[in-house]
Image (tube, grey):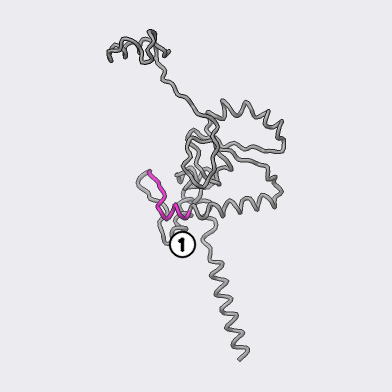
Amino acid sequence: MCALISDIVMFINQVLEKKIMKLPPLKALPVFEAVARLNSFSLAAQELAVSQSAVSHQIKQLETYLGEQLFWRSGRTLALTDDGRQYLDAISTALLQIERASEQLLGHEESRLRLSLFSSFAVRWLVPRLPDLQRLHPQVELALEMSSENPVLSDRVADCFITIHRDSPAYSYELLYVERLFPVCSQDYWQRIQRELGWEADVTGHDEPVLT
């Protein structure tokens, strides 16, 4: 009887262990994250230094395992499905934790800061000020992630962002500055517009155009 009970307990433990360790194809997870973040199979392949067919194979393997479609594909258009979006949100934090734990074991300093921002803002404003930042905070290693488009808010992309939108409740924001935009045109064009609109003077009430 004791031997039978011991066998039953062992069998239950084996079943529980299988349930706990029931993981998806681990190699496919960073591939899925890259495709979702870059919204492109080809760009993900370039970032991961693999072929595009290898990326497609990993995504297909993951979708087969989950039994769900993660991306909508229509020609060259690629978008996450609702299930794909939920899955991305769930695994991104886990992947980041694995990355940070590995960096700690490898001896990387926690003072490394990844900043994502517009390329134009980086070149014209931030980069000229980097020497002062390094002088004041020599312990901080700043890694810039520059883009011509609005940075994607994701922990996998950067630790902090300089962006123009604030629509994510998962992040806290601090206003840096308010930008003022002005229309610019030639004097001849401005005068022609005034004549076409029947303005005797410019909209500011001055006799001379204010735009140059």
Q: Residue at x 45, y 61 (%)?
A: 66
Q: Residue at x 55, y 32 (%)?
A: 176
Residue 82 lies in the magenta stretch: yes
- Residue 111 in percent (x, y) is at 68, 42
Image mark count: 1
* Viewer-side residue, 54 vs 15: 15
Q: Tell me if residue 34 comes above or below residue 135 in the rendering.
A: below
Residue count near mark 1 (Cα–Cα under 10 Å), binned few <14, some 14–19, many ≥20: few
Q: SS for tag 1?
A: helix
Given the image, on which type of amino acid does mark 1 rest?
Answer: Tyr
* Viewer-side residue, 176 vs 63: 176
Q: Residue at x 51, y 61 (%)?
A: 24
State which quarter of the image contains the N terminus. Answer: bottom right
State which quarter of the image contains the C terminus. Answer: top left
Highlighted range, magenta:
76-87
Residue 153 lies in the magenta stretch: no
- Residue 181 in percent (x, y) is at 45, 24
- Residue 30 in percent (x, y) is at 53, 51
For this view, does 67 lie left or right of residue 126? left
For this view, does 92 lie left or right of residue 141? left
The residue furthest bottom is 1
- Residue 146 in percent (x, y) is at 54, 35
* Residue picked out by circle 1: 65
* Viewer-side residue, 109 vs 38: 109
Tell me which corner region of the image, top left, top right, bottom left or bottom right, holds residue 26: bottom right
The residue furthest top is 207
Q: Tell me if residue 1 comes above or below residue 34 in the rendering.
A: below
Tell me which corner region of the image, top left, top right, bottom left or bottom right, holds residue 190: top left
